[in-house]
Amino acid sequence: MSQSASKDELKSRFELKTVLETSRMLIESRSSDFVLNNLLLIVMGKLLTSRAAILLYEPSSQSYSIQKSRGLSIENDTEKINIGFKDEQKQRSYAFYDDFSDKLPRLINNMEKSVFFPLRTSSNHLGFLFIGGKANGDAYSARELEFVESLCIISSVAIANSKLFDELRTTNRKLDRRIHELNTLFDLSKEFNLLADRQQITNIFKFALLGQLFVRTFFLIYKTPKSVSLLASSGLSKKPDKKEIKSIFEECPVDVLTPDEDCLERHPFLKENQIANITGISIQNEKIAVIGVGKRLSGEAFAETDFNFLKSLANLAIVSIQKTYFLEERIDKERMEEELSIAKSIQRGLLPDPIPEIEGIDLAAENISSREVGGDYFDVAKTPDGSTILAIADVTGKGVPAALLMANLQSMLHVLLPVEITLAEATERINNLIFRNTPIDKFITFFWGKYNSKHGLFRYVNAGHNPPLLLRNRSNTFEELSDGGLLLGAMESMMPYEQTDVEIQPGDLLVCYTDGVNEAINPAGDEEFGEERLMDCILENRNKKSAEIIREIEKQVREFTRGPLQDDLTLLVIKATG
Amino acid sequence: MKNFKINHRTISWLDVLDLHGELDAHTASQLEDSLKLLIDSNKSNIIVNCRELEYIASAGLGVFMAYIEDVRVSGGDIKLTNMNERVYNVFDLLGFPTLYDILDDERDAVEKFSSEV
């Protein structure tokens, strides 16, 4: 008797020791997996049963899942299990299957004498420990049940702790990720600010996005005022064509869009490249970019925070990319302005200043250049034989190229002045030189004349220029000085230019002009100033001085166009005073 | 200029890139150039030794993301080795261990490449 008592005592001490040791081990453990495994193995070892399991409660589905098991005979242990216990029933110390066979699940073939121990803390129900009946068919003793119960209580605390710990760890990891995201944003905002190279910005943006979101596929569509194009991409099996780029850009909202089946059908490009979502980015209420990213390679779905990161990073990058375009525009504009001012100064330098005075003639000439600087040119120069050369020309094109061609013409003209050749021959030489020295699409309309005041004779050649208008004293009709030949620089001279003499008598008025006058356009853009208006204006003002006539014509042209001049406007007027 | 450097060496048929310093947005393009150079010359068995790598930013990870597929399509791999804990944490945080072989030591990578042939 005493022996059996001491044996009992020993056994009970041993059990107590187990409980103590387990409790220490469990409480120190931070892994729920370790806790559950231990609970299961200790119970199985102590109670000599080969079948046991731990079922954990999942509040989201209000069902149980088997976390650990040994010797169960159900096939699918990932299936959710329902246990219809009421709350007060979950407070029991344990429940025999035989008493609740309608509510408890069948986990092994022979459920006889098996027991379910609720796992709980003071506030939470965690699940059940299940143990099958003893191998020898005996029922569990009260002491055994009590032992398991105390183990369950200790383990429950440990499970709850480790769960909390797991949650903390997940939260910490999430926080780490947020911090990393913020660091990335911070670093990149600094980096982008330093960069003006668009290629570098898009590259850094691409890599940061791929790395942070853990994706392989990426594209960036960007809209400039001129076009919508693919600015950067990675991992695409095929690049989208112009049409696809445009339609994706247009369809994407200014937010994150996860394309549905319909959308993927409409855009095979998105489907082929397994694009998981596209995001429209707007700056100042205008959509200017669309970013697409593929699936995350870890299989993890994108969360709201990922999208927020994507949007923030994209905004940073897009603002910087936009900045590079603005910068380019400004540089282009500055370059153009500079070029224009060069062209203007070349043009100014070529025009005679002051205009020489010529005996017996009231001469005035004016070039009013438009913003873009056309290729107008006029000249007045004395020849060695005491005559005067008057010239007016219009070079094709605008800006510096036109100004340079003009300079070319001017120098040829001045080289030929003292040479004893006829006006027609000189024209032919100029034509051949211009033709040889300039591209095929560059030419010059040119009119020039040599006025000899002694004889009142004006000899002219018109090479494709608007015919100057000659208004004879007391006549109301104009003569057009159109004889000559082809415009300069179009082809090598095949036929000699024709020179024509007209007599200039006191009171006669000659108006030379460029197409900036007759081709000036009204604001509606549907009507030109035309020769009719020019002639009327000349008739109205025929009695005024040459300079005033020019001012009147300019005034009327400006009234007609009502805006800045589209082309240079050049007038050269001579009036024989006798 | 930040201190980042890449050394290239070979171990028999394997190419090893030793990364030194800080791999961030600014220096990511250097890694890209090195990887591109290898891939363009059909070298696709690449070990990236991170022993001297002190810091890695997302853009640095992105370079690996952009080129892993090219390398694997041609039958090779990029294996990363000798990371310090701080660097490994960044890789781990963003899920890289699911896609990349990250090994303790360069020798492990050499062995692994040899056994994969």
Image (cartoon, coloured by chain):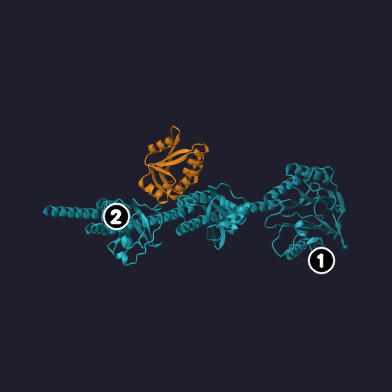
Chain colours: A cyan, B orange
Tell me if label 2 and label 1 are in contact, CB under 8 Å.
Answer: no
Out of A218 and A106, give the one closest to the viewer. A106
Q: How many marks?
A: 2
Percent across and percent down for residue A43 are 27, 53
Look at the image and tell me in which quarter the C terminus of chain B lies: top left
Q: CA distance from mark 2 to mark 1?
A: 126 Å
Q: Is residue A338 in view from this perspective?
A: no
- Tag 1 residue: A540
Chain to which the residue tagged by mark 2 belongs = A
Q: Nearer the viewer, mark 2 or mark 1?
A: 2
Q: Is residue A135 in view from this perspective?
A: yes
Chain to which the residue tagged by mark 1 belongs = A
Percent across and percent down for residue A92 are 28, 64
Label 2 CA crowd tier, 10 Å (few <14, some 14–19, many 20+) = many
| SS at badge 1 | helix
Q: Which residue lies most toward the top here? A: B12
Percent across and percent down for residue A27 are 26, 56
Instruction: Tell me: A193 left or right of A577.
Output: left
Q: Which residue lies most toward the left here? A: A2
Out of A276 and A78, give the one closest to the viewer. A78
Quadrant of the image occupied by residue A551: bottom right
Instruction: Tell me: A247 left or right of A567.
Output: left
- Tag 2 residue: A133
| SS at badge 2 | loop
Amino acid found under the numbered disc labelled 1: Glu
Amino acid found under the numbered disc labelled 2: Gly
Label 1 CA crowd tier, 10 Å (few <14, some 14–19, many 20+) = few
Instruction: Tell me: A463 left or right of A407.
Output: right
Disc marking residue A223: none
Percent across and percent down for residue A101 are 34, 61
Out of A438 and A270, give the one closest to the viewer. A270
